Image (cartoon, rainbow, N blue to C red):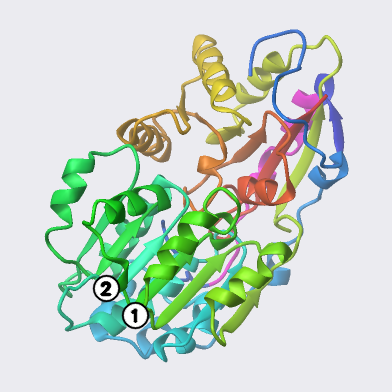
Amino acid sequence: MHGSIKSGELFIHIMQNKKSSNSTRPGNKDWRTKSSQNRSKNTNNQKESTLDNRVFVKKAMALEENKYETNLLVKDLPVNLKVKENLLAKGYEKPTEIQEKTLKALLDGRNVMGLAQTGTGKTAAFLVPIVHLLVNTKAAHQVLVVVPTRELAVQIEDELKSIAKGLNIYSQVFIGGTSVNRDLDKLKRPCHFIIGTPGRLMDMENQRALNFSNFNTLVLDEFDRLLDMGFSNDIKKMISKMNNRKQTALFSATEEASQKKLIYEILDNPVEVRVSVKNSTGDHIDQEVVHVKDGENKMDVLIEMLKNAAFQKVIVFAETKRWVSKVCKELNRKGIKSDEIHGNKSQNYRQNALNAFKAEKIQVLVATDVAARGLDIEEVSHVINYQKPKNMDSYIHRIGRTGRAGKSGKAYTFVN
């Protein structure tokens, strides 16, 4: 039975549903990217979420119902032969829906807004056509890719290198938590792609090491996050200086109605592609709430869950950096191998923690929403919201870390 669960019933429920997170969807492989606390009281200083608990409850639907069928093969794509060879070498046979439906527009130099659920290959959707257009061009800072998190920037460059292998197309990443002086040195040699987070990119521009007017192509990945209040001023400043911008692409899993005016100021006559976009969570993910009674220890409930064999590779989300560290420390104290990602950790620490999680050297990655967007981590069995997310977009992106690459997923949200 799916829905609200009392913590005392949790172990039996988990065992009954143990097989639900491992079903795979038949069909051809596509070319998507391969890419707290230990207290008896459960109160904290976070701003209370206003989300109704009912939004966290949803039974997974059969994946086959939403499967996209295409007759287009990678070997027949209208792009550079070497790009196709690289995609085929990665094992990709067909494009996903967002990739197929944005390809021609991007190849034609059109502005594009692409919306598709997490795990549908949005990164390759913009990289493949842009790489094709850059073949045999001299490196001159042509493409600026802006993302909200450091980890996503690194992931995009990794995907770019695999797609452009052997084509002499060069890139550099500029993110916080790394050496500013080293970044200044890197900018002395032009490259085709600059990939970075808004703060570090603006810092490079303020130091006159980066000239936004050099770029003719702009990509905003996870654009809804980049256009919110946290990043929007930096994005507006960048765009105002890009007076040679010829093409702009915006990609995300969700869109904000309040950003529509700004989007159409950025995009002139865009091609808009919406693929299975809803203001709801993934249909293929089982979503349930775990009720924690007054006086009951939430950490004990979490540990009980994580000791079950079905919870093999788990991301636990908390609302603040302080709570992430507390949860991680307590899990390790109880013998559950865990690490943490949040804004106070250095980039090397964050990347090492992420790599350890991907390699299954740790069972649990505890994180703020910095790990909720864009990261393509294979085989995440469960997502657990230790605290309710503040808004629906945050929830959608969080649970999108499970149920990827054609598999179902499982998400739990703790409520008091």
Residue under the point 48% across and 32% down: 342
**Can you give x and y, in whole percent of width and height, for residue 236 in the image?**
49, 63
Task: Tell me which label, 1 or 2, sits earlier in the chain.
Answer: 2
> Above or below — where is 245 with respect to 187?
below
Q: Quadrant location of residue 127?
A: bottom left
**Can you give x and y, in whole percent of width and height, for residue 39 in the image?**
70, 9
Residue under the point 44% across and 56% down: 147
Q: Which residue is mark 1?
A: 244
276 displayed left or right of 168: right
**Is most of the magenta stretch helix, strand or loop?**
helix
Residue under the point 40% across and 37% down: 354
Residue 293: mark? none
Identify which residue, 88 or 205, lies in the foreground: 205
Q: Which residues are magenta?
A: 10-27
Say what secondary structure mark 2 lies in.
helix
95 displayed left or right of 398: left
Q: Is residue 22 visible?
A: no
Q: Which residue is mark 2?
A: 214
Q: Are marks 1 and 2 in contact (CB under 8 Å)?
A: yes
